[in-house]
Structure formats: structure tokens, C-alpha cells
Amino acid sequence: MKQRKIPMRKCVVTNEMFPKKELVRIVRNAEGEVEIDPSGKKNGRGAYVSLDPDAVQKAWDKHVLDRHLDVKISDEFYSELKAYVAHQKARKELFENEQ
């Protein structure tokens, strides 16, 4: 059986390539609203960040997402993103240990 190609994306913070499932997509829609895109399919300008709370903190400190998405992002969004990434990383580690 032919092996399927794994889509790769670049983390905007670390500039490393990861499989798409190991990243979280942040999207800015046409109205300029920024939100987390768990499905990875919402319309708008997207940026990927790795599932590492340290990468999110670095993005927050240097306002990497602000520049990448051309919009001012609030501290509340960054704290929500950090909590989301920490939760997703814990889920990933939990399910890897079960297999």
C-alpha cells in the first residue's frame, strides 16, 4: 500500500517545519477578528504555532502573530492561546502513552 504524504507547515515562531497535526492554526478573518482554528479550515489569513507553551510565550513577548497577521492581538488572546496549547500538548502526551 502506498504511504500517504504528511502535510508539513512552518511554525511562525521557531521557523521549524512540523506535521500539520502538531501545530495550532491562528486565523484572521475578513473582519479582522483573530481566533484559534482547531479544524485548520476556517477562511482567512492563517499562521501556525507549535504545540509548545514556550513558543507561545515567545510569540507573545515579541508579538510575532501581530506582525504575521497584520493586526493588534490582545493579551487576553495570547493567554487563551497559551492555555489551549498547554491543554493540547497534555492531551497529545496522554494519548501517546496509551498506545
Image: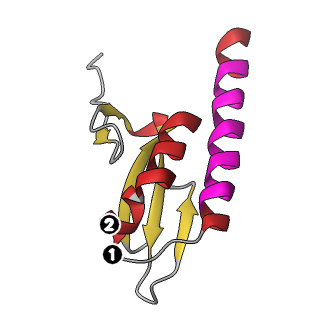
Q: Position of residue 61 (x, y in %)?
A: 48, 52
**Is residue 52 visible in the rendered structure shown here?**
no
Q: Residue at x 58, y 71 (%)?
A: 74
Residue placed under numbered mark 2 in the picture = 67
Q: Position of residue 19 (x, y in %)?
A: 37, 32
Q: Quadrant of residue 36?
A: bottom right
The span shown in magenta is 78-94
Q: Look at the picture and state if 62 lies above or below 66.
A: above
Decide whether residue 56 is among the magenta residues.
no
- Density class for disc 1 (Cα within 10 Å; few <14, some 14-19, many ≥20) is few
Callout 2, which amino acid? Answer: Arg
Colour scheme of this structure image?
secondary structure
Q: Residue at x 58, y 37 (%)?
A: 53
Q: Look at the picture and state if 78 lies above or below 92.
A: below
Labels 2 and 1 touching (C-beta < 8 A): yes
Secondary structure category for the residue under label 1: loop
- 47 left or right of 50 in image: left
Residue placed under numbered mark 1 in the picture = 70
- 18 left or right of 99 in image: left
* Number of disc labels: 2
Secondary structure category for the residue under label 2: helix
Q: Nearer the viewer, residue 17 or 38?
A: 17
Q: Position of residue 71 (x, y in %)?
A: 40, 77
Q: Nearer the viewer, residue 73 or 46?
A: 73
Q: Quadrant of residue 45?
A: bottom left
- 83 left or right of 8 in image: right
Q: Position of residue 59 (x, y in %)?
A: 45, 50
Q: Quadrant of residue 32?
A: bottom left
Q: Look at the picture and state if 83 lies above or below 54.
A: below
Decide whether residue 85 is among the magenta residues.
yes
Residue furthest front as drawn:
61
Q: Which mark, by number, is residue 24?
A: none
